[in-house]
Image: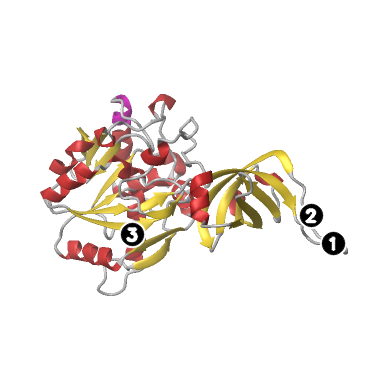
Amino acid sequence: MKLADFDYHLPPDRIAQHPVEPRDASRMLVLDRAANRWEDANFQDLPELLRGDELLVVNNTKVIPARLFGRRMGIKSAAPGKSANTQKEHPKATIEVLLTRQIGERVWQGLVRPGRKVPVGERIVFAAGELEAEVIGRGELGLRKLRFECAGDLLEAVSRLGHVPLPPYIGRPDGPEDRVDYQTVFAQRAGAVAAPTAGLHFTPAILEQLRRRGVEICELTLHVGLGTFQPIHAERLDSHRMHEEWYEITAVSAELVRKARREKRPVLAVGTTVVRALEDAASRAGEGEVVAGGPGDAQLFIRPGHEFRVVDQMLTNFHLPRSTLLVMISAFAERELVLNAYEHALRSGYRFYSYGDCMLIR
């Protein structure tokens, strides 16, 4: 299929710049695949819309303040007879670093802007020198490999000095409130550079209602990175290659998924990140397994024609045109049905993207 098949027009004023308050007051479009129709609802209706025996799978990744602003310190170089510590500071050269994935102890992959001015060997200092990084390698699509130095815990330093990495379609600087708003109630394991946004709608009260209804809840971790938001550069979908994203499914959660499948209970994935992790783990499962437990690196590009092995239902936000996420949900439901439902959502005033409303596909 062609990328142009997954396009639609979105007026800029439909892109949510702030979440609703309270977060479970968002709207929800319910898409019925079998009946080929949809209906308007509210997220607070979710417990009553379910059968009551579902397994709800959520992503417990925690967003780190992954945007760092520093200044260039030059490249360490050694002249004959001198030490290799001579550096030239560029006081006016502000450098933005967006961490995308941890690849080693104190070593991260990241996007650096402006990247063309930052060669391998360049050192970047953040704040008053509490945190430093050296560019130690280059990758595809402008990625850099950076090795960090700080006196204490790296993630603690990043948490203090960094900014919440709001998506570029949110046209405002991040604020203190985003450290709470752009984090799900499930968030436990730090490492994501973007929120698993379908989970942003949940509150403790909704979770308690779901449990009273008989819904079982389990967690996995997928640290959201470039793989989720990477643009599709090829016109034909089969030419696109996804970036890897690290995930882990515990033995307990893997067994709960197997149990739900044995008992023919629906598996409801909260968000496209959960879908990716479950379907990737299913592709690695051994005989007698439904999903493989343990860690993995998801590089699965789910597009029309994919046979879903685990996920029966999906809760998801509204996604960008021509994106891998829109392609994924068009694989789960028919593309024409999805795009028609999006057109209805636009006409009906739904709010789109990360801080926007959601859709339940069943």
Q: In this orientation, which residue lies closer to the viewer: 30 or 221?
A: 221
Tell me the residue at 46%/52% (across/down).
Answer: 227
User: Disc 1 or 3, which lies upstream in sequence?
Assistant: 1
Q: Residues within 10 Å of mark 1 (few under 14, many from 20)?
A: few
Magenta stretch: residue 45 in it?
no
Cα–Cα span, label 2 and label 1: 9 Å
Magenta residues (range) = 343-347
- Given the image, on which type of amino acid does mark 2 rest? Thr
Q: In this orientation, which residue lies closer to the viewer: 339 or 91?
A: 91
Give x and y (percent) for residue 6.
41, 40
Q: Residues within 10 Å of mark 2 (few under 14, many from 20)?
A: some
Give x and y (percent) for residue 219.
29, 57
Tell me the residue at 33%/40% (across/down).
Answer: 317
Magenta stretch: residue 344 in it?
yes
Residue of label 2? 86
The reply to whether the C-beta atoms of the residues labelled 2 and 1 are less than 8 Å apart is: yes
Give x and y (percent) for residue 235.
50, 45
Give x and y (percent) for residue 274.
33, 54
Residue of label 1? 82
Can you see residue 232?
no
Residue of label 3? 279
Tell me the residue at 41%/58% (across/down).
Answer: 300
